[in-house]
Structure formats: C-alpha cells, structure tokens
Amino acid sequence: MRTVSLLITAARQIARNVANQDGTYSIPDSEIIQYLNDAQDTMQNKLCSAKNIAKIFVTQTIIPLVANQAEYSIPDRVLLNKQIENVEFSSTGQTSDFVRLEKVNFFQRDTYPTTYPSGYYKVGNQISLQPTPSTAVGSIRVMYERAVDDLVAAFDTVSGTPSGSTINVVSSTAYTIGSYISIVNSTTGVVLARNILISNWTTGVITTSAAVSTYLVGTAQLSDLASQTVVLGYFTTCISQLPDACETYLVNSAAADIFGKDSSNDYTRQRNKADEILDEIIAAYKAQTSEVQFTPQLQRYEFW
C-alpha cells in the first residue's frame, strides 16, 4: 500500500482536481484524507462481514488479572466495539497453560468471587470474567478483530534512537503539548510506538509523559524507531493496513467524493466504478482457499 500523500495524488488525478495558479487546491488534502478514511472504514467493515474462515484483522493481547476485579478493558481498538473471537485464561500466566473460557450470557453472571474464572461475557469494550477471580495470579489472552488505524499524512522523522523520555526529530515544526503522536515504519506503515503523549517540546526535541519504551508495540525496540516516520493523532498511521488489493478502492472512492463537489454526473459514474471495485474485492475475499478445512473441536486433544 502506498503512503497517504501518494493516494491523495492518485485520487486528484482521477478526479482531474488540478492545482490553482498559486499552487493551492479547491479541495484541501485534509478533506481527501477524510474521504480515504471513510473508504477504509467501509472496506474493513465489508471484509469483516464477509463469510470467510480467514480472519485477516485478528490480533491478541494478554491482560494480567487483578484480585477481585471482574471487568477488563482491551487496550486497543476493537472493530465495531464487539468483534471478540476468543478468551483464554492461564492460572500461571505461562503461554502453555492457557485454556478456553466459555462465553456466557449476561443473565448468567456470578459476582461471588472464586479462585479462577470459568467463563466471560462482553460489556461494551470490556470483558467480564465469571465468576470474579479472587486472586491476582494469572492472566487472560483475548483474540479480537482490530479496527485499523486512521490515516494521516506523515509529519516528521525521528532523528537517532530515542532515549528515556526524549525523542529527537528532524523538523523544527512545533508540536502541541498534550497531544499524541505515533512512530511508524516509513515503508510499511506498521506502528512501532503508539499513542505517545507529548509533555513538552523544544525545537527538534519531544519530551514524552513516560519513557518511550512504554509506548512500544509488539516486539519493536527503541533502536527500531531511528529514522522512522512520526504521525500526529491517536491510533494513526500514514500507510493503510488494509490488504494491498484494497488500495484501488480507496483511491477510486476518494476520487468519487472529489467529483461530488463539482459534478453530479461524474460523481455517479465514479461512485459506480468504486462500488464495482469493492464488490470484486469482497468476492475474491469470500472465496475459500484450497486449504483443507476441518470441523472445529472445543477439546482438540479429545479423540473418538
């Protein structure tokens, strides 16, 4: 997938939205970025609603237990605030000890504390363990479909390797104290450090509210942040994390929205084209792979 700036250029070319003599455009980049985000949301929702065993947006997080606490928030963006795939519990916190928890209904809740939970139900973006665990030993592993990060333009570049709560950047452009940034791979858009809160800024130097290492995502290391791209905002990136095949829909959908500002005829034609592209992508995604499919077993070690 190309960067946001290149997608904007491609959408402008399709919509013949050329620059004015003074170099400005009738439709600013910020508005086209909103068009791209709208198209991205539509694309992800369509993909996730398609009936396919493959779950391309599924990820997982491990949450440590707190004694006598039933509700646990998922520290991420859950798609549509509901797409939970599986919840497992480990009494030791070790990966080898995770076992599946049964999904129960709200009316089956049991508020009487016990040593370990046996089930869970959902309340908004929270997992409620049932019964409430009375011990802080252990953790839960939650698998869920993640909403992709919002698209924004690249803003700056990290200079050197961050240290402590300091990030050196190339640009002298001012940052807003109290705002958030993320650091993403400049080639793939994969987020390396997410939702970094800025506590102070001087020319070329960002001071974060906590050590930069606490914002790292997955297996990323501080050294991985050197020379990578800085983006503004909460849960953002400059390269869409949708499959590459979705790029043509994002561009054509944004072009249709640009046409909508100028010509109803061109808008209708371009919107129909974008919808045809969307249908083709969804049809390809819904087609099952040639992998052999087996009936799921709740107890995979049970043979009969």
Image (cartoon, grey):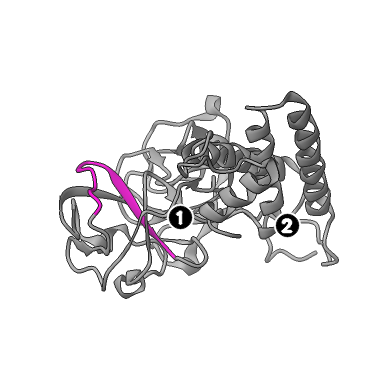
The quadrant of the image that shows the C terminus is: bottom right
- Residue 301 quadrant: bottom right
Judged left or right of residue 179, residue 116 is right
Give coordinates of residue 145: x percent, y percent. 58, 48
Mark 1 or mark 2: which is in front?
1
Q: Look at 76% across and 32% down and name the residue there.
A: 266
Give coordinates of residue 82: x percent, y percent. 56, 36
Q: Look at 46% across and 36% down and name the residue there.
A: 125
Residue 194 appears in the picture as rendered: no
Q: Look at 24% across and 61% down and name the residue there.
A: 212
Q: Which residue is mark 2?
A: 297
The disc placed on residue 61 is 1
Amino acid type, callout 2? Gln
Q: Earlier in the sequence, mark 1 or mark 2?
A: 1
Amino acid type, callout 1? Thr
Judged left or right of residue 216, residue 255 is right
Magenta segment, which residues? 173-185
Instruction: Please say if 292 is above or below 150.
Output: below
